[in-house]
Image (cartoon, rainbow, N blue to C red):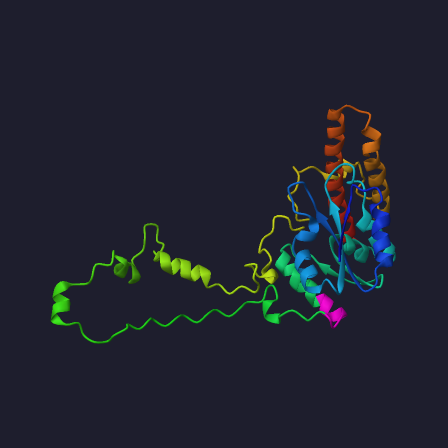
Amino acid sequence: MQFVLFFSDKQVREQLFAHVDGTRGLLLVTGVRHGPAMRSPEAREPFATLEFLHGRVLTQVLVADEGTADGMWRDPLGDLGDRLYPESRDDAYAVTSGYLLLEDGRPRTVVRKHGLPANDLWFLEDALSQLTSRVPPPDPARKPGTKRPERAPRSPRRPASTGAPSDSDASRGPPDDGGWSQRARGARAPGGSRRVRPEQASASESSKPWDDASGHDPREAHAEDSEATPPRGTRAPLPRKDAWAVLGLARDMTLDEARKAFRALIAGYHPDKVSHLAPEFQELAERRTREILAAWEEVEDELKSGL
C-alpha cells in the first residue's frame, strides 16, 4: 500500500505522524521531489517495484516536496526525525535524507540514498530481508559496485563446408550478394561502425530475455532517472554566495542558535504574510525563500560536521 503526502498541505506533519503511529508491520517513509512534469511519486522507481514485489509486506509513505513557497517552510521529515531520535542529531538528520524503515511504529534502520533507483532498490531489499523472512535477500552478484566477470570471447564461426572450391566455382568468382560477404569479413561503414544485415539487427533486438511480459525487467529500473530524488547535497548549486551572510548568522553560533535564527528569518516570507502584496513581490518572496533554504542546508551541514 502506498500513500503520498504533499508539503503544500498544511496538515502534512499531522498526517505523517498518524501514518507512523497507526501502521502495523513494516513502513517505509522518505521524501521525494515533485513537479508538474513529473510522474506521480508512487509510479516512480524504486517505489513501483517495491509495491509490485513486496506490497503485501511493506507500506510506503512518500512525502512530496513540490518546491512551492507554500510548502518550503515546512519540514515534516525533520520534525519526524526529531521526534524519533531526540537524543541523536545525526540519526534525526538521516531521516530527512534517506529511506526510513519502521516496524510497528518503531524505527529500525535508515537506508542511504545512492541516487540511482536500481541501486536504492538493492539496498532497500537487503535491509527488508533482515527485518522479515517474507522478503528474500537480493542477489549478491547484483550488488551495486560489484564487478561482474567479463564474458568469454566467442569462438569464430565455422564455415558450413570445408571442401575446396571446384575449378568452375573459382573461375566464376564469389557470388554477388550485394557486398555483404566483404562486410561480414570485417569491412566497416564510414565512421568506424560495423554494418549489420537488417534481418540480423531485428533478430538480435527480438532475442533479448526479459523478465516479464511488459518488455522490461523491473529490477533494472532506470539506470538513470531524472525524477529520482538525489541524496541531500547533490542538487545543482545556486550561484555562489556566502551562506552565512545570506542568513545573517555569525560563524560562532551553535546549531540550535542558528536554527532558531533561520526559522525566524524564513517565517517572514511565509505565503500568508505576502498574500496581500502584488504578484511581483510574491514572486520575489518565493525566490528569497529558495535562497534562504539553500543557504541553510549549507550552514546546517557545516555545523553538523563540526559536532
* Residue that appears at 61% across and 66% down: 143
Which image quarter: residue 129?
bottom right
Counting from the top left corner in percent of width and height, residue 259 is at 83, 44
**Residue 85 in sight from this viewpoint:** no
Looking at the rendered structure, the number of numbered marks drawn on it comes to 0
* Residue that appears at 16% across and 63% down: 173
Q: Is residue 131 magenta?
A: yes
Counting from the top left corner in percent of width and height, residue 120 is at 66, 59
The quadrant of the rendering that contains the N terminus is: bottom right
Counting from the top left corner in percent of width and height, residue 291 is at 73, 37
Vertical side of 192 occupied by 153: above or below? below
Extreme residue toward the top, this view: 278
* Residue that appears at 39% across and 58% down: 201
Q: Is residue 279 magenta?
A: no
Image-based side of 7 in relation to 143, left or right: right
Which image quarter: residue 220?
bottom right
Q: Toward the viewer: 29 or 210? A: 210
The quadrant of the rendering that contains the C terminus is: bottom right
Vertical side of 39 occupied by 22: above or below? below
Q: Toward the viewer: 239 or 147? A: 147
Magenta stretch in the rendered image: 127-134
* Residue that appears at 21% across and 76% down: 163
Name the dominant secondary structure of the magenta segment.
helix
**Residue 103 in sight from this viewpoint:** yes
Image-based side of 158 in relation to 94, left or right: left
